[in-house]
Amino acid sequence: MKSKILGMGHYVPEKVFTNDDMAKMFDTSDEWIQKRTGIKERRFVTESGVGASDLAVPAVKMACENADTDVSDIDAIIFATLSPDHIFPGSGCFLNQKLGLPGVPALDIRNQCSGFLYGLQIADAWIQAGMYKRVALVGAERHSAGLDFSDAGRDVAVLFGDGAAAAIVGPGDGTDTGSGVIDIEVHADGEGAKLLWIESPTCTEWEWLDQSMIDRRATYPAMNGKQVFRWATSKMPEALRSVLARNGYTIDDLDLLVPHQANRRINEFVAQKLQIDPNKVVHNIQKYGNTTAASIPLALSEAIQEGRAKEGDLVAFAAFGAGFTWGAGLYRI
Ligand code: UT7
């Protein structure tokens, strides 16, 4: 039986950091950030002791409410994040404890910006196999803890924001035409692994963190922006075309495209390449920046809340990010 999203929820920290706030910390400007990325502001957690699992709690509770499901009905957790609370155990275990779900399995996945698509593919397979009935699929990030807020890190620091979103995934209505996951494809190419990464701490050395790593700023994310841009604008259209064709749809059949929010220019480029009506593309990067694994579910949750994604709509997802990983999916609301 195919799976469907029974309810969605999201949560972002209250504290807004505008582009002008970023310009107070290092050499950048509102004009540069808006022109190159479309971002106007992002949310950052400012309290200590608050991790991705804490941001996930209100997102899951909202998703349960919208799914008309009790938190206690959740029978599996998939937690997608690149900014886990700790290196181990996974944030899914912390979330399990915070939601009061002892014994419920918790799987962390580390597929960065494609995390939601990888996670939805797993949740869909579990539901289809009859293993679980209420999977809490979470994407959550506290990027602010690991960004380089100095001139050296400005190319990356302006892009990211904190946030969480969740979907409760369960069995569909048993028909082929009803609401639910139609198809998802995901990919990876380690050729790009070091083009967007954090080098250290690393378990490839005798000491996984030493002073030299700190001194050369290897503990901060590093990115070859131009290469990432090039790959993203090639792989997202390719995956979208592939998933549409495999399922007998064309671009014109789409009601909405909910892409990963890495850069507004990337998504406009993808839409132009595929000749999708720009009004069908969901953007919220202006408010939140890139929230990585939370980005697609956050955009979808808002689109549903705002009535932009309506019952019966054919929605496509597309993602590209570190790994490199990428993918696309089709979903009937
Ligand atoms: O989820 C996936 C993660 N990431 C992405 O998808 C990002 C993909 N890449 C991008 O979005 C773009 O490459 C960026 C927005 C990161 C950069 O845009 P760009 O047009 O590729 O700029 P650039 O890296 O070529 O830099 C142009 C100039 C440079 O100065 P010079 O060498 O021309 O004097 C940079 O030093 O802009 C400078 N610059 C900045 N200036 C002000 C770089 N970062 C900043 C900044 N503020 N934050």
Image (cartoon, rainbow, N blue to C red):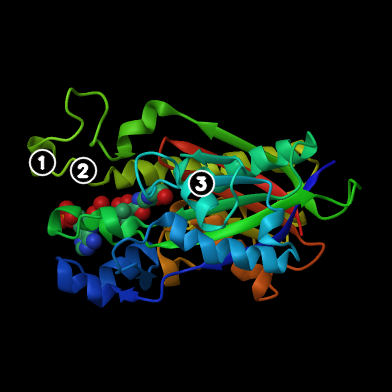
Mark in front: 1 vs 3: 3
The residue positioned 49% from the left and 45% from the top of the image is: 93
Amino acid of disc 2:
Thr
Q: Secondary structure at mark 1?
A: loop
Dot 1 beta carbon under 8 Å from ligand 1: no
Give how far apart the Cα atoms at labels 1 and 2 are: 8 Å
Amino acid of disc 3:
Gly
Q: Secondary structure at mark 3?
A: helix
Which disc is residue 92 wearing?
Answer: 3
The residue carrying mark 2 is 219
Residue 250, image x, y percentages? 75, 48
**Is there a contact, CB below 8 Å, between mark 2 and mark 3?**
no
- Mark 1 crowd level (few <14, some 14–19, many ≥20, 10 Å Cα): few
The answer to whether any part of residue 272 appears in the image is no
Q: Earlier in the sequence, mark 2 or mark 3?
A: 3
Give how far apart the Cα atoms at labels 2 and 3 are: 23 Å
Q: Quadrant of ligand 1?
A: bottom left
Residue 143, image x, y percentages? 34, 56
In terms of depth relative to the viewer, which is nearer, 234 or 17?
A: 17
The residue positioned 30% from the left and 67% from the top of the image is: 33
Give how far apart the Cα atoms at labels 1 and 3 are: 32 Å
The residue positioned 79% from the left and 37% from the top of the image is: 128
Which disc is residue 216 wearing?
Answer: 1
- Compared across the picture, whether 310 is left or right of 321 comes to right
In terms of depth relative to the viewer, which is nearer, 144 or 277?
A: 144
The residue positioned 32% from the left and 45% from the top of the image is: 226
